[in-house]
Amino acid sequence: MYKLLGGLKDYLKWQDIVTDNAVFRLHNLFTTVLLLTCSLIITATQYVGNPIQCIVGKGLPTHAINTYCWITSTFTMPDAYLREVGSQVAHPGIDNDYGEEDHKKYYTYYQWVCFVLFFQALLCYLPKYIWDTLEGGLMRSIVMGLNIGICREEDKCNKKKVLLDYLLRHVRRHNMYAIRYWICEALCLINIIAQLYFMDHFFDGEFFSYGLRVMSFSEQAQEERVDPMVYVFPRVTKCTFHKYGASGSIQKHDSLCVLPLNIVNEKTYIFLWFWFIILATMLSLLVVYRVVIIAVPTVRPYLLHARNRMVPREVAAAISRKTDVGDWWILYMLGRNMDPIIYREVVAELAKKIETAASNTP
């Protein structure tokens, strides 16, 4: 198992230069690894047993029936979930269909789960790919190794001078840098909401309320409750197989099919339900937070000061007042990547030079 999943650890490695937000990384990296891990575990049937095992009558090839029921579909009778197991029905949802096709609930998703999870992982990684392409290594270039405080004084002074020259030369030209990143954050929220709707459609409208039903299951009366995990991910289903008899007439064979894979599926998707709800909430709050930063400029000095307490509030206020939101964002991200003492010196010198330049402007 370690060899199977060990390659995913590279996605979670520590980053020496940060160009994004922690919630952004939770969506792009952690969720991607989580979905890929679930897909690999479900795919590796040797770790979870045979995906389907059907009970067949004499004269029928077991392997053929298993394959047929796996690639077509199996079904349950929803009315049978409310009947007592052992006396009225053999298993939850298993009963005679009496030829009533409209009363059957078919399950065809299980053969697609591993592919869907892999596709979801690609969608979660897409915003990071877009941002890395747009960012182009700008933050790493302007940091120039100043994230390490122990360095030669001469090298430090030269790098500080280059950084200050860059910031002064490109003042009020970083708006698109910030806007592109914030659009990628909004894309994360759109992706999660779209995936919630997609999974609800994938499970025939059963996913949105899945987690809530699981939580309320234990509070319901024993004779009235239906285990939502068994209802959405049944462990035992039925499958109908038709074949020709010796005289050429069509024979119908009912089989009980055990789905061990659904034991893994039900645990996987209850965790994904809670994680996607939590992540959607965090991303929604993050988008609101970005709107506040754009719409209320007075909060920027407080955030810049909070990023590095060694930067005086009056310096943070002067910087925020004389620069656009894109320049402010560049300075804010520099505070996350540079040595705190070096960062304080850079911001103080930048504030003086911007004030001087503004006073010399007629």
Image (cartoon, grey):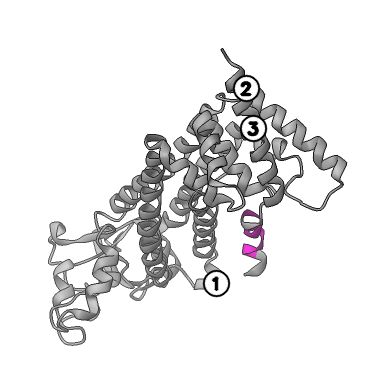
Report the Cα–Cα distance between label 3 and label 2: 9 Å
Residue 78 rendering spot, x and y as whole percentages: 17, 67
The foreground one among 254 and 343 is 343
Q: Can residue 4 be seen in this view?
A: yes
For label 1, the residue is 47
Q: What stretch is highlighted in magenta?
A: 4-11
In the displayed structure, would residue 190 be above or below residue 56?
above
Q: Residue at x 42, y 61 (%)?
A: 67
For label 2, the residue is 357
Q: Which residue is drawn at 45% across and 49% down?
A: 120
Q: Is residue 323 visible?
A: no
SS state under label 2: helix
The foreground one among 88 and 116 is 116
- Left or right: 180, with 108 as reference point: right
Query: Mark 1 vs mark 2: which is more N-terminal?
Result: 1
Query: Mark 3 vs mark 2: which is more N-terminal?
Result: 3
For label 3, the residue is 352
Q: Which mark is drawn over residue 9?
A: none
Q: Residue at x 65, y 29 (%)?
A: 353
Q: Which residue is drawn at 20% across and 74% down?
A: 226
Residue 55 rendering spot, x and y as whole percentages: 35, 75
The residue most toward the bottom is 87
